[in-house]
Amino acid sequence: MPEETSIDAIYNEWNRREFIAAGLAAGGSAVWPMSAMADESAGAPAAQPNLVFLYGEGHRWDCLSAVGHPILKTPNHDRIANEGARFENAFCTNALCAPARSAALTGMYSKSTGALGNENLDKPLDIPYFTDMLREAGYEIALVGKAHCRDGAKDRHWDYYFAFNDAVADYYQPKFIEGRGADLGPETTYDGYADDIAMDKAIAWLKEPRTKPFCLLFWPMTPHSPFYRARRHLDLYNGVSIPKPSTFDDDLKGWPGRSTPVIEAKNKIGTHVNPDGTRSLEELVKDYYAGLVAVDDMIGRLFSELESSGRMEQTAVVHTSDHGYFLGEFRMFDKRLMYEPSIRVPMMIRYPKLIKAGAVRKEMVLDIDIAPTLLELAGVRPRKEMQGQSILGLASGHSDPQWRKEWLYDYYEYPGYEDVRQHRGVRTETHKLLHFYTVNEWEMYDVASDPDERNNLYGKPEYAFLQSELTSALDRLFEQIPQRPGATRTEPAASF
């Protein structure tokens, strides 16, 4: 963290309007030339690219055919990876929809924004978003799809807004709010598959004449539970066998090595009736896959529009997800816990002017890196309060020996849906330590040699030194991140 950051002072002394104005003026929207974006023949900065930010919903890192998934086929997602750069080790810092989306928009941890869980969604967040800064730099901005963040981001100026602010909309008769600038209309019900309707609106906006570069945020809700399918995919995966994860039957073995909060959390398939519709492993996995195929269709439509209008090569495409998703590991569904299926996400960037096709990077990148990356693509200097780092240099093939080797995970929402207790942890390139601090229970894993996280090493004498090192790292990382006053817990939330 930069030494000059003083989040506490900012929140205590500035009101919302002053904070936004100061953030944009001091660290925000000045356009700065980047050598990586320079036209070498002319010696001048290249034009600002168009930007597309595709933000998946619960999309696991391994659910792409580009990484060798044995069942799922995602050719349009794969195109981003195959024609750009893919990060093998990308993570979210709080595996829950609303706080993750705030992290992506602000480049800051939940602890600093105060957006801890899925509560208080009717209250605006008094921190500049990267979209505010892009608009100051001359971009036209649209948010289309699932907002699910403070006030649904309706308090910001959007050149086009078509979104809803719940965890999930009715898949077949969704309600959206539509408008431009401060002129947002009433909530309106539409007939049709929700994200198909959203993509129709996004494409219609892209077709409008404009003289400025654009930034489109297309944020689908699919495949959020309860996983209703598009009509064209109702029979997809019929007869396909779904393999059972190696840890699916851990409950029958007495939950070896698991903490009490993990055992007691209400996120298990076949344990309780819930609105997620998680009645069986096969149903969950097939419906989840079908949802990702539907999103892949939509991305294909988007790319067709960009190509037909001649803007594909002038558009940088960034794809990631708010969090991952359990598909039967430890018999679990959903997210929240700091296990790999929950926190690990895809991260890909396609922009041929800067990024060579087929690049694969192993550095650990985070959701808080998204905002600085999009700003750098636009040539806009990030605010000093942002805690992430642009990954554009890595995507472009440059090495960075100072890149992060460890990072903090920080989850807050308890009690609430599924009752996953508060916990935080440190993840390094090879190991992970989790602390359920309200009950003082710990888990530690060697994720390099034990990727399924089956063997809890915490408390074993032969790992005492490693345990001490990770504990110190966790304390250090947590203390380094400024805490917004009052951002220590979250209220119960019924949303999922």
Image (spheres, rainbow, N blue to C red):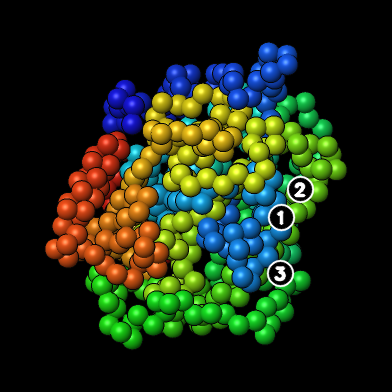
- The residue that label 3 is drawn on is 230
SS at badge 2 = helix
- The answer to which quarter of the image holds residue 237 is bottom right
> In which image quadrant can residue 57 be found?
bottom right
Q: Label 1 is placed on what type of residue?
A: Asn
Pointer 1: what residue?
Answer: 76
The amino acid on which the numbered mark 2 sits, given as a three-letter code, is Phe
Residue drawn at x 52%, y 36% is 394
Q: Which label was assigned to residue 303?
A: 2
Which circle's residue, 2 or 1, is located before the other in the chain?
Answer: 1
Q: Secondary structure at mark 1?
A: helix
Q: Is residue 409 above or below residue 294?
A: above
In-image side of 16 versus 434 (left or right): right
In the rendered structure, the answer to whether residue 45 lies left or right of residue 412 reads right
Q: How many neighbours does mark 1 have within 10 angstroms: few (below 14), some (14-19), or many (20 or more)?
A: many
Q: Are marks 1 and 3 in contact (CB under 8 Å)?
A: no
